[in-house]
Image: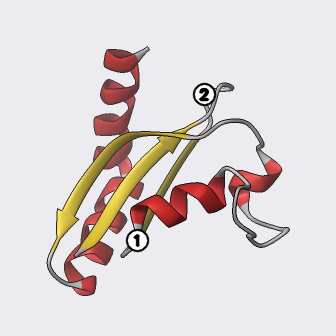
Amino acid sequence: MFYVYVIKNERNKIYIGQTSNLEERLKRHNGILKSKLSSFTRKNFGKWEIIHKEEFNTRSEVIKREKQLKGYQGRLFIKNLKFERS
């Protein structure tokens, strides 16, 4: 399984990504496991939490959906999610 996910931190920064191991990936975003020094979530520190996730069978499906979420309509969708959870 592959996942596209949206996370946010206390400062309301948003990150959209995709992975095959969501639990491990979230640990990397939160600094529990080692990650790149130059990563967006490391530079924008804080506790990251999942606000949305979707599951797919193939990598190509998840990459396509990730691109959609990073586009204008996807950002509107995420903005509405953010306000529902705040």
Callout 1: few (<14), some (14-19), or many (20+) C-alpha neighbours within 10 Å? Answer: few
Up the image or down, 30 lies above or below 34; here it is above
Residue 38 x, y percent position in the rendering: 82, 68
Residue 75 x, y percent position in the rendering: 38, 42
Give the number of the disc on residue 1: none
Residue 32 x, y percent position in the rendering: 70, 56
Q: Does residue 6 appear to the left or right of 63 in the view shown? A: right
Callout 2: few (<14), some (14-19), or many (20+) C-alpha neighbours within 10 Å? Answer: few
**On the image, numbered disc 1 is attached to which residue?**
21
Identify the image quadrant of residue 64: bottom left
In the rendered image, which quarter contains the N terminus? bottom left
Q: Amino acid at mark 2?
A: Asn
Disc 2/disc 1 C-alpha distance (Å): 24 Å
Up the image or down, 27 lies above or below 11; here it is below
Identify the image quadrant of residue 70: bottom left
Up the image or down, 51 lies above or below 64; here it is above
Q: Nearer the viewer, mark 2 or mark 1?
A: 1
User: Which residue is nearer to you in this view: 10 or 24?
Assistant: 24
Identify the image quadrant of residue 66: bottom left
Q: Residue at x 76, y 44 (%)?
A: 44
In the rendered image, which quarter contains the C terminus? top left
**On the image, numbered disc 2 is attached to which residue?**
12
Which sits earlier in the primary sequence, circle 2 or circle 1?
Answer: 2
Q: Amino acid at mark 1?
A: Asn
User: Which residue is nearer to you in this view: 62 or 29?
Assistant: 29
Residue 45 x, y percent position in the rendering: 78, 42
Q: Residue at x 24, y 85 (%)?
A: 60
